[in-house]
Image (tube, rainbow, N blue to C red):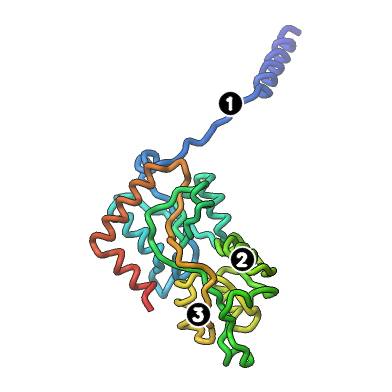
């Protein structure tokens, strides 16, 4: 009987211990010291000609090649993740799955309140993608932003162009119907414009120039924004990594390697 009571007492004590609130483990913020200790820098980009893509048996892309140059000067291993959604990239950046978002991100006052940005990597602007008259039943392309009133414009979900389009609607005093596509990337939207499945999309000039060679029926002559500085994004908790990245990027530019990579993807 004493043995039974003893066993019951042990079970009760064990149960009480298991129900006791356990301390919450908080992940340590990853800044450069933690990254250097692990030896791995995690970068996320998108699958396209600007980010990362497979051509034959090789991997290409502006962001990919620039990240490999970072690996050379930093001595870090670069692990690259692919996310088509910019919102998803920012969420995983905050959760510390990634350390850097390597995309053409316009640097705005609003964005600076939440994230750190590297020194500018590109000068770019948002443009309206539409069809030329000979591919659009002789309807001429829009050339005045006022003509966008009442039109439907497509962008990928989480695109930085959303803020600009909302501001533009206020500026022209008319409604612009904005469709944020969750399933389609910028490149897929450009193809849909070329195939007359949709009429208007907005994207970076650099990206549209790459695809106009493949789809000459596309018109990319109407600006939606002024020229913008574009950079890579980091968490606010990574200031040392930001300084390191800017140092490495400066070295890459000084050697002329940055210009070589840039001309490969952004000179037309």
Q: Where residue 158 appears, x then y in whole percent?
A: 59, 60
Question: Which residue carries the number 2 mark?
Answer: 171
Side of 209 where 184 appears, left or right: right
Helix, strand or loop for disc 2: helix
Which residue ends up furthest to the right in the rendered image? 1
Pointer 1 or 2: first along the chain? 1
Question: Which quadrant holds residue 84?
Answer: bottom right
Q: Which of 150 and 174 is in front in this view?
A: 174
Q: Which of marks 2 and 3 is nearer the N terminus?
A: 2
For the N terminus, the image quarter is top right
The residue that appears at 44% across and 58% down in the rendered structure is 102
Quadrant for the C terminus, please.
bottom left
Q: Which residue is drawn at 61% across and 78% down?
A: 192
Q: Going 46% across and 60% down the picture, which residue do you hit?
A: 103
Q: Is residue 21 above or below residue 219?
A: above
Q: Which label's residue is closer to the chain start, 1 or 3?
A: 1
**Helix, strand, or loop for circle 3?**
strand
Where does label 3 land, which residue?
221
For the residues labelled 1 and 3, the Cα–Cα distance comes to 58 Å
Q: Which mark is residue 260?
A: none
Task: Identify which residue, 66 or 77, lies in the foreground.
Answer: 66
Q: Rate crowding at label 3 as few (under 14), some (14 to 19) or many (20 or more) other CA atoms within 10 Å.
A: some
Mark 1, residue position: 23
């Amino acid at each position: 009987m004493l043995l039974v009571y003893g066993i019951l007492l042990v079970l009760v004590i064990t149960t009480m211990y298991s129900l006791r609130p356990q301390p919450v483990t908080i992940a340590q913020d990853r800044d450069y010291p933690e990254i250097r200790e692990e030896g791995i820098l995690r970068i996320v980009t998108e699958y396209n000609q600007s980010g990362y893509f497979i051509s034959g048996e090789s991997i290409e892309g502006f962001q990919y090649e620039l990240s490999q140059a970072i690996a050379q000067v930093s001595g870090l291993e670069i692990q690259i993740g692919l996310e088509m959604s910019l919102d998803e990239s920012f969420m995983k950046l905050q959760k510390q799955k990634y350390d850097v978002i390597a995309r053409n991100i316009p640097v705005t006052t609003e964005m600076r309140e939440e994230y750190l940005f590297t020194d500018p990597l590109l000068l770019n602007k948002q443009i309206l993608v539409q069809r030329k008259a000979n591919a659009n039943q002789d309807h001429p392309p829009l050339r005045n932003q006022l003509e966008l009133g009442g039109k439907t414009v497509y962008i990928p979900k989480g695109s930085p162009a959303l803020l600009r389009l909302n501001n533009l609607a206020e500026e022209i005093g008319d409604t612009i119907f904005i469709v944020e596509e969750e399933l389609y990337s910028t490149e897929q939207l450009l193809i849909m414009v070329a195939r007359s499945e949709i009429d208007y999309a907005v994207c970076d000039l650099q990206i549209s120039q790459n695809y106009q060679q493949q789809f000459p029926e596309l018109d990319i002559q109407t600006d939606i924004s002024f020229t913008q500085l574009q950079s890579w994004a980091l968490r606010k908790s990574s200031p040392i990594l930001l300084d390191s990245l800017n140092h490495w990027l400066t070295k890459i530019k000084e050697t002329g390697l940055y210009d070589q990579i840039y001309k490969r993807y952004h000179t037309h």
